[in-house]
Amino acid sequence: MLEVPNFHSLSRLILRTYWFPLELPRHLYHFTPQTLAAMLTKARFRAIRLRGVPAALAATWSLQLLWNAWTGNAGGRAIAFNPVLLCLFFPVSWLLARFHLSAHMTAEATKPSVAVQDGGPQALQAGFRES
């Protein structure tokens, strides 16, 4: 299981460079639901299940970044942790998560054992005999 920012989120499309989950340079790669599923499939993961995650804090932090840029106050945090805004944004972020448009997403996937990937236990045993 992993959780990553959703580059296809509605908030990223609206806020662009002020979208907090970009967190450059900490996040070097960003995924949409399609690209994350494709990467996991290419890495031979199976039973991939993607879900949106409600992320009210990502919304308030993004607004904080926008406000700080507009006012020139680089250290402001009054909006980011505002409990009223968090309560107002949570239902919206929950609804966006239901449609895979929230700021974060999770992926659950399984990876078959090496023996299953390469032809089953017989192939694994044959490999030991050849060595």
Image (tube, rainbow, N blue to C red):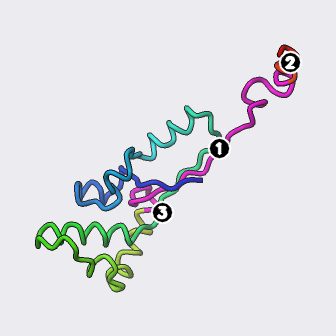
Q: Which residues are magenta?
A: 97-124
Give left or right: position of 112 versus 17: right
Disc on the earlier residue, 1 or 2: 1
Q: Are marks 1 and 3 in contact (CB under 8 Å)?
A: no
Figure quadrant of residue 104: bottom left
Compared to residue 122, the image places residue 70 above or below, namely: below
Q: In the displayed structure, would residue 100 be above or below residue 43?
A: below
> Residue pushed farthest top?
130
Q: Name the residue: 11% across, 70% down.
A: 72
Residue matched to label 2: 126
Task: Say which of 29 and 39 sits in front.
Answer: 29
Q: Secondary structure at mark 2?
A: helix
* Residue type, numbered disc 2: Ala
Q: Residues within 10 Å of mark 2 (few under 14, many from 20)?
A: few
Give the amino acid type for the residue marked by disc 3 in the picture.
Val
Total numbered labels: 3
Query: Mark 1 = which residue?
Result: 47
For numbered disc 3, what is the local secondary structure? strand
Amino acid type of the residue that numbered disc 1 sits on in the rendered structure: Ala
Q: CA distance from mark 1 to mark 2?
A: 28 Å
